[in-house]
Amino acid sequence: MMLTRLPAGRIDGDAPPLARTVWAFPVVGLLVGASMAIGFGIAQALGLPPLAAALLALATASLVTGGLHEDGLADTADGFGGGATRDRKLEIMRDSRIGSYGVLALIFTLGLTASAIAASGTVLGLLAIAAASRTAMLLPMTLLQPARTSGLGHGAETALDGVTLIAFALTLLLLIFTGTLIAGAIMLIAALALTAFAKRQIGGQTGDVLGATQKLTECTGWLTLAALA
């Protein structure tokens, strides 16, 4: 319900805390990766060049997620790049308008990801990177305090408990099965680096930081696979 636009029924009454649902992040990632694989496969069947197929795969993912993570990346880039103080950074990140930093972040991240998918795109890679990049969001959720007293980031704080470990374990098994463990390790480093940067910039995490983590680790994972191809 939160990470995609896919129909998932309704919740009567109060929704459960996000911390109880994080085991499903890699599972949702698999669904998104499967949608990307379908888009990629259709493009290939139509005889489109690899780069066009890769862009269609990313477009399919954006349709499934509603551009949730792309929005987070753009807002984070605008806030971190344009704000002089912590409060100003958070104010910019909450603004629905997009600035030059956000535009550039989206152009370069999506462009690099698409070119890397075109160079090394496989169904297994699409599944593994989509799942692992969503599990990567658990790192700022686990390691950082919320930067605000409201919003998605405030409700997304979790601990390194059994539910979180299930998500990491499922992702590790998937990376091993798909032969993308090295890419997963590089994605982990990228997620930790962004987590440390967010702490320095705003003293914690927000929903935008989580979205930025997904997009940047996805890009890092695909660049790694392309380099190893």
Image (cartoon, rainbow, N blue to C red):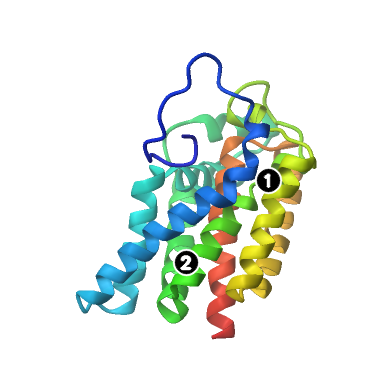
Q: Within 10 angstroms of label 1, few (less than 14), some, or many (20 or more) residues?
A: many
In the image, 86: left or right of 73? right
Task: Label 2: state its secondary structure.
Answer: helix
- Residue that appears at 76% across and 44% down: 200
Quadrant in which the C terminus appears: bottom right
Instruction: Identify which residue, 216 or 79, lies in the foreground.
Output: 216
Neighbour class for label 2 at 10 Å: few (<14), some, many (≥20)? many
The amino acid on which the numbered mark 2 sits, given as a three-letter code, is: Leu
> Which residue is at a point 47% across and 80% down the rendered structure image?
120
| Residue 159: x %, y % from top left | 78, 37
Q: Is residue 69 visible?
A: yes
Residues under labels 2 and 1: Cα distance?
A: 20 Å
Q: Foreground residue, 197 or 154?
A: 154
Residue at the top extreme?
13
Q: Which mark is residue 126?
A: 2
Instruction: Report the side of 120 relative to 199 (left or right).
Output: left
**Quadrant of residue 87 within the rendered picture:** top right
Can I make out residue 198 in this image? no
Q: Position of residue 181 (x, y in %)?
A: 67, 72
What's the residue at 58%, 30% (across, down)? 152
In this view of the protein, which residue sits in the foreground, 93 or 143? 143
SS assignment at label 1: helix
What residue type is disc 1 on? Leu
Q: Any mark on residue 138, and which? A: 1
Q: Are marks 2 and 1 in contact (CB under 8 Å)?
A: no
Residue situated in front as seen by the camera: 18 or 93: 18
Image point 72% across, 41% down: which residue? 163
Q: Is residue 33 left or right of residue 161?
A: left
Residue 191 image-quadrant placement = bottom right
